[in-house]
Image (spheres, grey):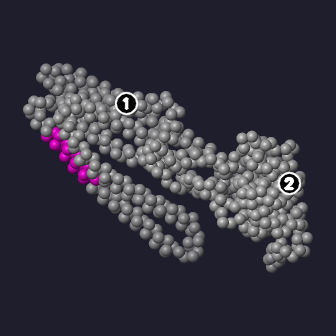
Amino acid sequence: MARSTPDATPPRKIGNLAIIWRFTARYKGHVAGAVLALLLAAGATLAIPNAFRLIIDRGFGAAGSGDIGRWFQYLLGLVVLMAAATAARFYFVSWLGERVVADVREAVQQNLLRLAPSFFEENRPSEIASRLTADTTIIEQVVGTTFSVALRNLVMGVGGIVYLFALAPKLAGMMLLGIPVVVLPLTFFGRRVRAVSRSSQDRVADVGAMVDEVLGAMKIVQAFGQQGREAERFRDAVEKVFQTARRRILLRAVMTAMIIGLIFGAITMVMWQGAVDVQAGRITGGTIAAFVLTGGLVAGAFGALTEVYGDLLRGAGAAGRLAELLAEEPEIQAPPRPAALPEPARGEIEFRDVAFRYPTRREVSALADFSLKVRAGETVAVVGPSGAGKSTLFQLALRFYDPEGGAVLLDGVPLPAADPAAIRARIALVPQETVIFAASARDNLRYGRWDASDEALWQAAEAANAATFLRALPQGLDTYMGEGGARLSGGQRQRIAIARAILRDAPLLLLDEATSALDAESEQLVQAALERLMEHRTTMVIAHRLATVRAADRIVVMDQGRIVEEGTHDRLSAAGGLYARLARLQFEGMAA
């Protein structure tokens, strides 16, 4: 099935911004307040040049010199109105920006939690995380700043032009003819500057990625004596940043010279013509002053609109990427009418003629015509070389994937016919790579059953041989575990995973290399905890270390996605097949 990936950059179409409006429209009161405040602020700003015209023409005029205070009061009132309206606009649009970003992040995260693991194999989690941070930050800028700036400048630009024609039609016509002369070169150079700026940001990002990579592998760098080479690589990357920045600086310098020359040249020409008209008595001094001030506002407004358009395009690209994540539908879903799993739960799992290939590795068959039934209460160990398909069995049992052929059944019910949540509620998993969240010990334990009491947590910890080290923690169960459980040893992390499974109290237990990479003491503690966990449960065990599976009711030997042998440890050892060869290599290695 074709899939749009967040790694791909969607086209920067302004229409993508519709997703932002969907979230913004939930807060119509704040939107109305922002628009009203924006119109008041823009109107007050446009009225200020007219106030100066009245001060000059009527306040300083011979006939009205005694009434000058009235016009300054008028100007002061406009300033107060503009300040209050601007503050209100800032509050409303900033509130909307933060609120919309929070809503978008929550909506994207909720949808991501629905998606099957296959989605995260085809799409890099780091890229998805970037969408939730960098792209939503752009959205916040668009909602909290860019939209209001664009609307304010549009109102001021259009309103200013209307007022200019009302003041002096001839001068307004001259100014409009001069706008393309000013705007077109600035637009051209602005695009060049933005392109070089993006390139500069990419080069800086390269430097950051290089620093992160090298510092994270400092032991390897020093062990292999590659400090000089890494310093040279870093020097080259920094030099590229400098060269790109130099081009950006040169372009901005040229653009600044053009801005100053063209804008002030145009203003000078218009003022020159205005001065001639004042001398001829065709317009007043106040009119030319108001015209110049308004012209500056109009020029600034349209200049800002060209910049705002670029920001809107960036926002459209970010919105498009977020829209892709929001539109993604999970491949694994509950059917419209899920079949009820039988009660009481037995934990019986069956693989019937299953064929499966991973979406990202279509050329390799993970399982082929695979059939296996694990009866209620039975312990079955699955062994075999790497890539034999052992872990795939657990992926299918948890319904992270659906097989291409055949069926997987839990307590006699085909998994696609049942609700995935109901299926997983009957399964407890102890993975090879234990996941410890950056949270307290309590929260990590009760991931097995979130409503578990502290008494239940300690009982599970005792059964998992974890209570001793948990009580020794500085704040007990409230102790922060660190990123990835950095404060725990491998054996301690594994025992927390076992305590989670004990709290789960599920009829089917899946153990995936639960004692791998542990020292002898830790393995003994973990193995003792596992034996208690396995009592009165259906258990499937994946293990490379064959010494841990001798006591299994059955041992299933897999190779290239198929069962090649099946039986007890003694029987398989005597058969002289793949299991016997694996056992001989391991036990001889241990004896040596």
Nearest to the observer: residue 476 or residue 311: 311
Residue with the most extreme left position: 280
Q: Is residue 540 above or below residue 13?
A: below
Nearest to the observer: residue 401 or residue 474: 401
Nearest to the observer: residue 153 or residue 47: 153
Q: Quadrant where the C terminus lies?
A: bottom right
Residue flagged by tag 1: what amino acid is it? Leu
Look at the image and tell me whether residue 431 can be seen. no
Image spot of residue 371 (x, y percent): 82, 60
Q: Could you say whether the residue bearing mark 2 is in a helix, strand or loop? A: strand
Residue with the most extreme bottom position: 592
> Within 10 angstroms of label 1, few (less than 14), some, or many (20 or more) residues?
some
Q: Is residue 162 above or below residue 496?
A: above
Residue at (71%, 65%) from the top-left corner?
A: 365
Q: Could you say whether the residue bearing mark 1 is in a helix, strand or loop? A: helix
Residue at (34%, 37%) from the top-left corner?
A: 154
Q: Which mark is residue 322?
A: none
In which quarter of the view is residue 141 placed? top left
Lateral position of residue 352 relative to residue 204, left or right: right
Residue at (36%, 46%) from the top-left corner?
A: 307
The span shown in magenta is: 255-272
Q: What whole-number distance in Å separates the C-alpha atoms at marks 1 and 2?
A: 69 Å
Residue for badge 1 = 39
Q: Which mark is residue 538?
A: 2
Look at the image and tell me whether residue 456 can be seen. yes
Image label count: 2
> Within 10 angstroms of label 2, few (less than 14), some, or many (20 or more) residues?
many
Image spot of residue 537 (x, y percent): 86, 53
Residue flagged by tag 2: what amino acid is it? Thr
Image spot of residue 289 (x, y percent): 19, 34
Ranked by sequence position, the earlier of labels 1 and 2 is 1
Residue at (41%, 56%) from the top-left corner?
A: 198
